[in-house]
């Protein structure tokens, strides 16, 4: 599959389809998507820590339902419209299910990354500029 020819929104949709089973029943965490040249590279889920009391892990409360995961995926795809003028970086989707109510919330963080070594310009020290101008 050629990711370069596929729109980023479609790539994000595929990521969320791959992560669907992992997101089901998850109570809170972060979906991480790393982007390079407008293509998804690495992705995954960072689950919030599992709490224990007196050294014992208790029964987990209800996490995300299948419908909530699908709504989460739709929100993630729609958020790509907010990405502007950058091709390298990370997108972080934080999510949490409120205990007792079953309601969920999510927030989105876009992070752009740049690399000076691959920039279009090169730094030229001042002394080198003067010596070129003063040369016969």
Image (cartoon, rainbow, N blue to C red):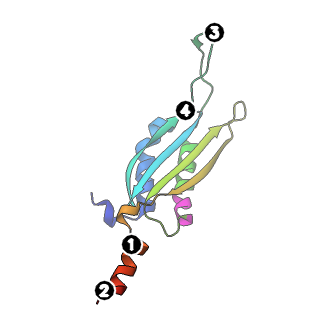
Find numbered disc 3 in the image and state the secondary structure of the residue it sits on.
loop
Circles 1 and 3, Cβ within 8 Å, touching? The answer is no
Give the labeled residue for mark 3.
Answer: 54
Task: Compare residues 11 and 91 and report the one nearer the observer.
Answer: 91
Circles 4 and 1, Cβ within 8 Å, touching? The answer is no
Which stretch is magenta?
Answer: 77-82
| Residue 65 makes an appearance in the image | no
Task: Compare residues 124 and 61 and report the one nearer the observer.
Answer: 124
Q: Please identify, in this view, whether the residue under mark 2 or under mark 1 is nearer the observer.
A: 2
Mark 4 → mark 1, Cα distance in angstroms: 55 Å
Residue 52 image point, x, y percent: 61, 17
Q: Residue at x 46, y 61 (%)?
A: 9
Mark 2 → mark 3, Cα distance in angstroms: 78 Å
Find numbered disc 2 in the image and state the secondary structure of the residue it sits on.
loop
The single residue placed furthest to the bottom in the displayed view is 136
Give the labeled residue for mark 1.
Answer: 124
Q: Is residue 81 magenta?
A: yes
By secondary structure, the bulk of the magenta-drawn segment is best described as: helix
Q: Please identify, in this view, whether the residue under mark 1 or under mark 3 is nearer the observer.
A: 1
Mark 1 crowdedness (10 Å alpha carbons): few <14, some 14-19, many ≥20 = few
Task: Judge left or right: residue 92 versus residue 118.
Answer: right
Q: Please identify, in this view, whether the residue under mark 2 or under mark 4 is nearer the observer.
A: 2
Residue 56, above or below 120: above
């Amino acid at each position: 599959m050629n990711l370069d020819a596929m729109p980023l929104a479609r790539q994000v949709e595929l990521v969320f389809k791959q992560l669907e089973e992992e997101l089901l029943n998850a109570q809170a965490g972060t979906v991480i998507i790393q982007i390079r040249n407008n293509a998804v590279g690495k992705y995954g889920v960072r689950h919030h820590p599992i709490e224990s009391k007196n050294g014992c892990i208790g029964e987990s409360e209800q996490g995300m339902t299948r419908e909530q995961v699908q709504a989460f995926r739709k929100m993630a795809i729609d958020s790509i419209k907010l990405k502007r003028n950058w091709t390298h970086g990370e997108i972080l989707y934080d999510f949490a299910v409120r205990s007792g109510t079953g309601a969920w919330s999510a927030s989105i963080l876009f992070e752009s990354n740049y690399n000076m070594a691959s920039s279009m310009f090169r730094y030229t020290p001042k002394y080198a500029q003067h010596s070129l101008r003063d040369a016969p």
